[in-house]
Image (tube, rainbow, N blue to C red):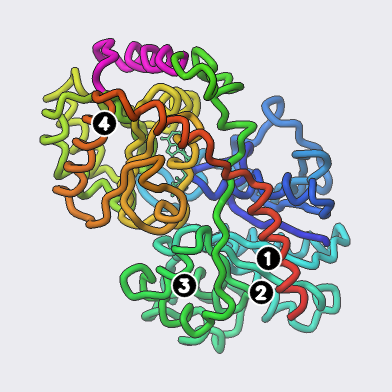
Amino acid sequence: MKIAICASEVVPFAKTGGLADVTGALPLELESLNQEVIIIMPRYKAIQEPKFSVQRLKPDISYSVIGKNAKVYFIENDMYFNRDGLYGDKAGDYKDNLDRFSYYSRRALELLKEIDFAADIIHCHDWQSALIPVYLKTLHIDNPFYQNTKTIFTIHNIGYQGLFSKEEFPKLGMDWKFFNMEMLEFYGKINLLKGGIEFCDIINTVSPTYSKEIQTKEFGYGLEGILTKRKNDVFGILNGLDYSIWNPKTDKFIIKNYSIENLHDKYKNKEDLQRICKLPIKTDVALFGIVSRLAEQKGFDILADAMEKICKMNLQLVILGTGDLKYHVILENIVKKYPKDISLHLKFDDPLAHKIYAGSDVFLMPSKYEPCGLGQLISMSYGTIPLVFKTGGLADTVTEDDGFIFDKYKKEDLIKTIDKASKAFKGKKKWPQLMQRAMQNNFSWKESAKKYLALYEKAKSR
Ligand code: ADP
């Protein structure tokens, strides 16, 4: 099958979150299942030689290769993409995001024709590439080149929909008749995610539980109605984990590699993390780690409220993340008060993330909602026990056998569960078993890629 993966971020070229992990890993597995895969993404400023090997194809198209021979095509446009950020900067979202990603979507479709890649499947991800299914069924509806092309649209997070003002609609190059409630209009605005959902052949999300949740008012962010209408086309496939990157046996960023056979070496990483974070070197208190966007979705509303209590619980906490300035400020103030208990790193730092996954005892991920979540999968592979709220992909991947779970989204329940984890760590007895069970999980991409292939077949047969 010929598969084109279209996404705004792909590991190793550009990443702000789990989406990039998925679009970087899935093509490699599809390739090993003998599929012909290409990837199309924007060329951001950071994608440069010598860090990446990039070849030129056309004046505005370059490419690189991942896996055996999966070409990653970069759409270039200095005015739109030659920037440090992917979607915005400190001042917020870039004002021209509609121009940027409508341009990307149009150019991606043209490129397929120019390189004569008659895709069986175009697999789009989130609002940034949601216009591709829209353009395919509007601007290109009569173009014979795309006649046999089907689209899969994966929603990684329904909370981010790509909303723009109605006045910007002419930028899409489409007739106003498409600005209606059944298509791109959403409470007077343009909603790109909605467009993707309405126009694609199959809708997918990144865990079975989340695929059900988004069809409810509580989780659907206003799109539950259209999703319910298409419920027979909505599927959920868990993300896999790239064990070539997230593996304590081979991880190049951590001070001491370890495995299930020599778990005591994990504690050298704990000591290293405490040292880097200027926390007291202690073996008998649980070290909790967070690697996350600082957003309400990730549980920071209840976490912020619980912080004072947590800091008095005789545990250590390392937080790595960036996001809402509100949480930057709250956390900075708390650290000033409890510098020996918390270490705060307000940045995106991949090497430090690896050290936190390896050096912590518990990985804190109390997300309010979580489409799939990679943090809990990564932490389990490092024998770091996840503490999660029972929702979405967290509910699908963490059990009482390998993690700590609370099922009422309240700060009291979070505190209680943190206390339970902290005591279990100090109790020592059951902890090694917990670590072993966590590490024995296998969330490899192999199984997920097979499921995607089955979904592609389903789309093809429509
Ligand atoms: P998201 O909703 O942000 O995509 P996921 O759990 O699916 O959440 O994936 C987050 C990914 O981004 C993980 O690989 C995590 O380690 C990484 N990550 C998040 N924040 C940071 C940060 N500040 N520094 C380094 N890596 C980060």
- Residue bearing mark 3: 191
Q: Which amino acid, by three-letter code, is at mark 2?
A: Tyr
Looking at the image, tell me whether mark 1 or mark 3 is earlier in sequence order. Answer: 1
Q: Does 56 sit left or right of 89 as displayed?
A: right
**Are the residues tagged 4 and 1 within 8 Å (C-beta)?**
no
Quadrant that contains the C terminus? bottom right
Looking at the image, tell me whether mark 4 or mark 3 is earlier in sequence order. Answer: 3
Quadrant that contains the N terminus? bottom right
**Are the residues tagged 1 and 2 within 8 Å (C-beta)?**
yes
In this view of the protein, which residue sits in the foreground, 125 or 236? Answer: 236
Q: CA distance from mark 2 to mark 4?
A: 54 Å
Looking at the image, tell me whether mark 4 or mark 1 is earlier in sequence order. Answer: 1
Residue 367, percent across and down? Answer: 33, 50
In this view of the protein, which residue sits in the foreground, 51 or 392? Answer: 392
- Compared with residue 356, is residue 35 higher up or lower down, i.e. above or below? below
Q: Residue furthest right?
A: 116
Q: Is residue 272 magenta?
A: yes
Judged from the image, the secondary structure of the residue bearing numbered disc 2 is helix
Q: Which residue appears at 61% of the width and 22% of the height?
A: 250
Q: Which residue appears at 82% of the width and 48% of the height?
A: 58
Splitting the image into 4 quarters, where does residue 304 fall?
top left
Q: Which residues are magenta?
A: 265-285
Residue 157, percent across and down? Answer: 45, 59
Q: Which residue appears at 41% of the width and 40% of the height?
A: 402
- Residue bearing mark 4: 424
Q: Is residue 318 magenta?
A: no
CB of residue at label 2: within 8 Å of ligand 1? no
Residue 173, percent across and down? Answer: 62, 75
Judged from the image, the secondary structure of the residue bearing numbered disc 1 is helix
Residue depth check, mark 2 versus mark 4: number of the one nearer the observer:
4
**Are the residues tagged 4 and 3 within 8 Å (C-beta)?**
no
